[in-house]
Image (cartoon, rainbow, N blue to C red):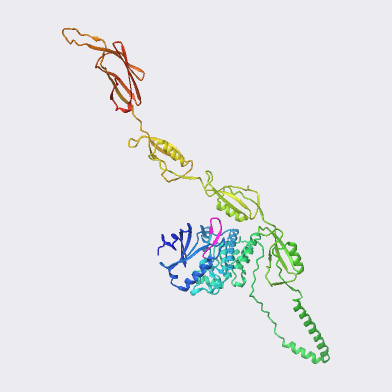
Amino acid sequence: MNLIGKIIGNRYEILEEVGNGGMATVFKAKDHVLNRYVAVKVLKDEFTTDTDFIKRFNTEAQSAASLSHANIVSIYDVGHEEENNLYYIVMELVKGKTLKQIIKKDGILSWKWAVNIAIQIASALEEAHKKGIVHRDIKPHNIIITEDGIAKVTDFGIAKAVSNSTITSFGTTIGSVHYFSPEQAKGGITDAKSDLYSLGVVMYEMLTGQVPFDADTPVSVALMHMQEGAKEPIKVNPDIPTAINDIVVKAMQKEPTNRYESATDMLKDLAHSLKDPEGDFVIIQNKDGEYTRVMKAVNNDGKKKKQNFFKEHPKAKVPIFILGLILIFIIVFFSTKIILDGGIIRNVKIPNLVNKTKQEAQAEMDSLKLKLEITEAASSTVEEGRVISQSPEFKDGEKIKEGKIIKVIISKGPETTELPNFAGNKIEDAREKALEIGIILEEEHQNSDTVQEGYVIKQDTEAKTMVKSGDTVKIYVSSGVKKTRMPTVVGMDEGTAKATLANSNLVANIIYESNEDEENGKVIKQGAEQGTELAEGSKVDITVNKIESKPKTVNLKFIVPKLKGSNESTNTTENKVGADSKTATITVNINGATRINGKTVKEGDEIDCGTVTGSKIQHVEVILVDSGDTKSMTDQFNIDDFDDNATHYIKNN
């Protein structure tokens, strides 16, 4: 059934498939109630028809939902949608890669990084086991490493509450065969120690780049878990420290009784290994092994010789008999005393020295006639001068003989180290280095024009400063240049376009182009499309249409108005016109320059005053002298209002 785009539980919108396993399919979804992204694990169809399985699925999911730990993927909701017969678990959506993906990409992990991941997984298991929940499927595929380097264990949805039957159901062993414990492979009872075995296998793979057992078929691999001993990881990768190798070997013991008693015990050795990687503090013992003593055969010849001795020396019987009684008394007396006293060398209870001062530990060891062997190590959690751990460990009721050595590690306080320079490094490299030296990075993201995105810009604490494990150092990580989105300016005039770009923190680079088909003075092109992300302060080309206007020529004419001026008589008899012709003089100034100066004109004449060229306002003055009277007429016009070679008649006002 295709769930993409559907909403289940009236709140979870399925967006995309992100994983597919043997029991369920995992989707990314949007929780519309809390407005957040989540992971939704939907049980596969073949399991939804079995009512017993569904009950177990719900019980286990409800139990897992009670877990709250930094290294466990949180479960938010468990639901059933009757319409489509869907059973689902809603979980925290974690951004990162599975440990399996990291191993496939990087191969062998550094031992410190591997131990750090193992500590986080063991911490998650410690929390689950305290709540009575066994995971039963610890493998790299179920461990997500976040972008901050945090390991998160997922798939507790198929874990089983210890209070219920822990025998695998339906004749099927749940889990992945390469990471099975021997008891899982047998289909037997599984408990917290089964998870520790699987964690040992995960550590083996991180440290060597390969699983301890591999074969062509799952059945063959399961048989190898039950019957064969794994090659020690240090023989595969000689760079593995001794203590780390021993931790893996102890976790992967075939018999559960020979493994770590709890995740807490394993955590102690893992933490200790970071301080003393070549130490021999890991105790691997075979609690089930028993020695069979070989007795010598009875010599019948000796018996005969003994009988012959008394026949040959009859008087020796009484003294020898008395001596035998005395010897028997002495043996019985001292045997009884030894038993009552716990032996000639007494057995004493192993003291609990953890968190005691060196002086307190020495005094208690002296009172018990035990020897103390001290080494020192840095610790950010145990006060300076107090015991971090001891070997053999304290266990209520367990004893050792007088004179035995108990090794203790005394805290030197937090380990100090020289702070490296993180500036210019990738944030992933900075995080890994911080894990190695045991400091906490507080990250703040900032925009930067000079430092590439994902690289460290600077740090508050100067490099080469001595810092203690557990200290917090603030660093600033580049988010790259600050971005802005390109607006649309096409169709705007030049000034408006500049202002629009400035409001988006962009700078206009004006390019002029003449296009008769577009509106003059408007933006006709922009260098980046609308919505494009650009660095703030970027220059953007915008093309403005600028049509160059050609100069126009206008012909100027003036019609002489009615005159009152002097008569120029024509009295020839041949003409007999008899009418008076009135005349005047005219002067024409255009833009301050004289074009016509004192020309004699007649009433009604059309005077050609020349032409003007350009694209601006023109000023014309006509001075008419009529019978001694001077009349000045002015005209003003804009050439742009005329067509080229048009005629303008100067106004007669």
In the image, residue 332 above or below residue 369: below
Residue 614 shown left or right of residue 281 in the figure: left
Q: Quadrant of the N terminus?
A: bottom left
Which residue sits furthest left? Answer: 574
Q: In the rendered structure, which segment of residues is drawn in magenta?
A: 145-155
Using the rendered view, name the quadrant where residue 494 is placed. Answer: top left
Q: Is residue 475 magenta?
A: no
The residue lying toward the viewer, choosing from 567 and 331, is 567
The residue lying toward the viewer, choosing from 392 and 606, is 606
Using the rendered view, name the quadrant where residue 314 is placed. Answer: bottom right
Q: Percent x, y for residue 144?
A: 53, 60
In the image, residue 468 above or below residue 3: above
Q: Percent x, y for residue 439?
A: 62, 54
Question: In this rendering, does residue 382 appear at all?
Answer: yes
Using the rendered view, name the quadrant where residue 311 is placed. Answer: bottom right
Q: Quadrant of the C terminus?
A: top left
Q: Percent x, y for residue 176?
A: 51, 68
Q: Is residue 146 magenta?
A: yes
Residue 585 shown left or right of residue 118 in the figure: left
